[in-house]
């Protein structure tokens, strides 16, 4: 993801700097507890500058989501373009979980804090997420047409089901604070390898949990 680069070169676009700062503050303090003053300080702008670009804190959160999801979709499109059709679903899932791993602050905001905004949940039409589902649904539909995946489940429904798995994995990974492989026996659950989990998701999708299907 590239949203950090424009702001961290020094100067740069104020709107981009504000988005980067908001992501850090939302991840650190939570959406409700985050203050516009803190975001402005982190971005190196005056408090009033925030409102030149965003109507409210909710609007800032939604704009952050749009920016991040646009980048996610671009990364996913680039990843599947490099793979033959039979490998595109795996590439999609692995790339998505790799992005979660590489950008934990963004993952925390998108999986936890975003749901704290009533405006996002009730009013926002979510076009970037619709594009995400269309891309995933297109991969599934193509595999169904070739007999590689079960065709009785509508592709658009399967896309939502798969996203549900990915979203829950991201949420569990973000919430598990203890490092992967660390800690004493009997301690809190370790943070699992979310990139390796892409293989587990593919196995679940293509083979299920039934021993007879292996």
Image (tube, rainbow, N blue to C red):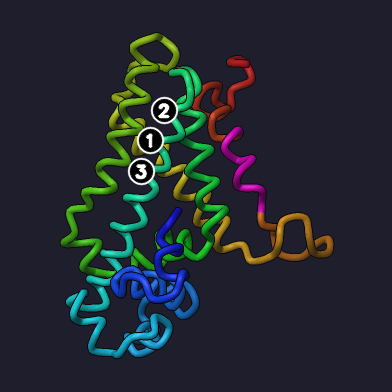
Q: Which mark is residue 81?
A: 2
Q: Are marks 3 and 1 in contact (CB under 8 Å)?
A: yes
Residue 82: image location, x then y, percent: 47, 27
Q: Residue at x 45, y 63 (%)?
A: 5
Residue furthest to the right in view is 184
In the rendered structure, which segment of residues is drawn in magenta? 192-199
Up-down relation of residue 114 to residue 150 (above or below): below
Q: Earlier in the sequence, mark 2 or mark 3?
A: 3
Up-down relation of residue 122 to residue 99 (above or below): below
Q: Residue at x 27, y 34 (%)?
A: 134
Residue highlighted by disc 3: 73
Look at the image and say whether residue 197 sits in the magenta stretch: yes
Residue 144: image location, x then y, percent: 36, 15
Residue highlighted by disc 1: 77
Q: Which mark is residue 110?
A: none
Residue 24: image location, x then y, percent: 46, 74
Up-down relation of residue 157 to residue 74 (above or below): above
**Camera-nearest residue between 199 and 210:** 199
3D distance between C-alphas at marks 2 and 1: 6 Å
């Amino acid at each position: 993801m590239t949203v950090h680069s424009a702001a961290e070169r020094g100067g740069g676009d104020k709107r981009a700097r504000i988005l980067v700062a908001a992501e850090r503050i939302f991840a650190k303090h939570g959406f409700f507890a985050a203050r516009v003053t803190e975001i402005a300080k982190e971005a190196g702008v005056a408090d009033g500058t925030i409102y030149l670009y965003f109507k409210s804190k909710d609007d800032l959160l939604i704009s952050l989501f749009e920016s991040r999801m646009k980048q996610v979709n671009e990364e996913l499109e680039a990843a599947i373009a490099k793979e033959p059709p039979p490998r595109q679903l795996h590439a999609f899932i692995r790339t998505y979980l790799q992005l979660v791993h590489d950008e934990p602050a963004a993952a925390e905001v998108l999986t936890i804090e975003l749901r704290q905004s009533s405006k996002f949940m009730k009013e926002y039409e979510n076009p970037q997420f619709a594009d995400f589902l269309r891309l995933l649904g297109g991969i599934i539909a193509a595999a169904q047409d070739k007999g590689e995946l079960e065709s009785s489940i509508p592709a658009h429904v399967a896309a939502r089901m798969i996203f549900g798995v990915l979203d829950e994995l991201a949420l569990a990974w973000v919430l598990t604070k203890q490092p992967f492989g660390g800690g004493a026996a009997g301690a809190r659950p370790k943070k699992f390898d979310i990139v390796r989990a892409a293989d587990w998701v593919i196995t679940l999708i293509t083979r299920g949990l039934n021993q007879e299907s292996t």
